[in-house]
Image (cartoon, rainbow, N blue to C red):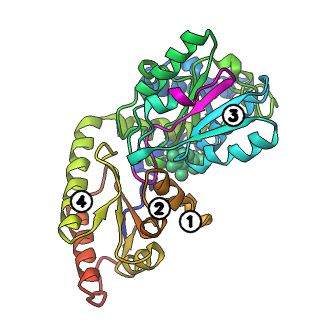
């Protein structure tokens, strides 16, 4: 068995979520759009799950649109902007590719895209305000960065946008990709006053291929495919009810005792951080970061060091799993926070889950120590 420290990339499906997936697949198999008894039952369960998810996020059920994941949730929101008159989009330079990859497309479609940096890992509300112009239509700033774990000051960032709105008498949409925040750090969509946010189940022990879009005003959403008018006409296609039910189940598990878990994981992360620092390893993650993500500077290039850790049975990531497909992406995010390219190329991301134990962390620290002392990999009885 491997020691898994790549939970920001994905997580194993929990037992409860898997059971719920199976139960719904077997028993509530009607199509929610069918008018017979099984269809009505499926529709009722779909709405029950929507209600539960919405109430756990403190929003209305009409504000939740289930999608195939966060990437689709971002796409649904962003494509809807194309129905507006062209203008400027402001996005941070530390966005996940689910957001940042839209920049090129938007530019090709005649939009202006302005990217703002995140000095020390954080976007500054005053810098954001300075970047706004009379033709800014939307702002994209994530809640928690997937590479460093930096918790962005979303509430303050939205406030500076709302101030600008008032001064100029026009609406600017604020979207926050909140995948790494869900269940893991404080999240208050209503208080933050964001217009949209994306979420994914597989980062919190739910299944792959299911996520959701929160949208404050659903009428701004134009479906990518209208199809049968599902999800209030905003997202066509038969709803993935087993996955939605399993997502709701996984979310409930993460929300139970969230603060307690956050504290426990924070302590484990602090232990790893302190021990690695004692070995002379630099930490890239800024102070106000998620308890679930720690980015450090390895003594060797990331690909080499992550491979050496893997040989000892430790799964970590050189930045983020998605960025592994595209060289240089993680470096780009670290550079945006002021870290030079050479150091950024040595980034290793250690990402924890609510189930990471202190003994797993101790084993990881020990492995770092052995590699730093040039010891040969030891055979690991857990593999
Ligand atoms: N946004 C962030 C911050 C992520 O970490 C991820 C997952 O890697 C995504 C978006 C994409 O999520 P999904 O896999 O559900 O499309």
Marks 1 and 2: in contact by CB < 8 Å?
yes
Residue of label 3: 78
Q: Secondary structure at mark 3?
A: helix
Mark 1 C-beta closer than 8 Å to ligand 1: no
Which callout, 1 or 3, points at the residue further toward the start of the chain? 3
Structural crowding at the residue carrying mark 2, measured as other residues with C-alpha within 10 Å and reported as few (<14), some (14–19) or many (≥20) = many
Identify whether 36 is placed above or below 313: above
Kindly identify the residue that appears in the image at 42 percent across and 61 percent down: 6
Residue of label 4: 273
Q: CA distance from mark 2 to mark 1?
A: 8 Å
Identify whether 367 is placed above or below 222: below
Residue 41: x and y, percent?
61, 25
Question: Is 349 contained in the magenta span?
Answer: no
Q: Which numbered dot is residue 319?
A: 2
Q: Of helix, strand and loop, which mostly describes the magenta segment?
A: loop
Mark 2 C-beta closer than 8 Å to ligand 1: no
Which callout, 4 or 3, points at the residue further toward the start of the chain? 3
Q: CA distance from mark 1 to mark 3?
A: 24 Å
Mark 4 C-beta closer than 8 Å to ligand 1: no
Question: Is 144 contained in the magenta span?
Answer: yes
Q: CA distance from mark 2 to mark 3?
A: 25 Å
Q: Secondary structure at mark 4?
A: helix
Marks 2 and 4: in contact by CB < 8 Å?
no
Q: Secondary structure at mark 1?
A: helix
Q: Which residues fall within the magenta stretch? A: 129-148
For residue 351, which quarter of the picture?
Answer: bottom left
Structural crowding at the residue carrying mark 1, measured as other residues with C-alpha within 10 Å and reported as few (<14), some (14–19) or many (≥20) = some
Which callout, 2 or 3, points at the residue further toward the start of the chain? 3
Labels in figure, total: 4
Left-right relation of 152 to 265: right
The quadrant of the rendering that contains the N terminus is bottom left
């Amino acid at each position: 068995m491997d020691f898994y420290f790549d939970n920001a990339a994905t997580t194993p499906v929990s037992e409860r979520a898997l059971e719920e997936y199976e139960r719904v697949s077997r028993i509530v198999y009607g199509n929610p759009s069918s008018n017979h008894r099984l269809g009505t039952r499926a529709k009722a369960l779909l709405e029950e799950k929507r209600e539960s998810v919405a109430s756990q996020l403190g929003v209305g059920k009409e504000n939740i649109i289930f999608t195939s994941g966060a990437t689709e949730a971002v796409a649904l929101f962003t494509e809807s902007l194309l129905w507006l008159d062209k203008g400027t989009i402001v996005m941070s330079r530390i966005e996940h590719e689910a957001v940042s990859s839209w920049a090129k497309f938007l530019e090709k479609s005649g939009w202006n895209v302005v990217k703002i940096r995140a000095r020390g890992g954080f976007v500054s509300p005053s810098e954001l305000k300075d970047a706004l112009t009379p033709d800014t239509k939307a702002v994209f700033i994530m809640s928690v960065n997937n590479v460093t774990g930096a918790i962005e000051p979303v509430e303050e960032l939205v406030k500076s946008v709302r101030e600008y709105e008032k001064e100029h008498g026009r609406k600017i949409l604020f979207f926050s990709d909140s995948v790494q925040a869900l269940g893991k750090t404080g999240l208050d969509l209503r208080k933050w006053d964001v217009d949209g946010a994306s979420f994914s189940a597989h980062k919190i022990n739910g299944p792959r291929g299911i996520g959701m879009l929160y949208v404050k005003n659903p009428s701004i959403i134009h479906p990518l495919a209208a199809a049968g008018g599902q999800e209030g006409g905003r997202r066509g296609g038969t709803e993935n009810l087993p996955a939605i039910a399993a997502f709701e189940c996984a979310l409930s598990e993460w929300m139970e005792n969230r603060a307690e878990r956050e504290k426990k994981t924070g302590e484990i992360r602090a232990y790893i951080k302190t021990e690695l620092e004692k070995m002379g390893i630099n930490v890239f993650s800024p102070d106000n970061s998620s308890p679930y993500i720690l980015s450090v500077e390895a003594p060797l290039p990331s690909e080499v060091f992550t491979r050496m850790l893997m040989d000892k049975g430790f799964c970590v990531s050189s930045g983020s799993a998605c960025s592994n497909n595209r060289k240089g992406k993680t470096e780009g995010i670290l550079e945006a926070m002021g870290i030079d390219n050479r150091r950024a190329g040595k980034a290793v991301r250690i990402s924890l889950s609510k189930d990471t134990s202190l003994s797993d962390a101790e084993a990881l620290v020990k492995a770092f120590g052995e590699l730093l002392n040039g010891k040969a990999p030891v055979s690991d009885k857990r593999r």
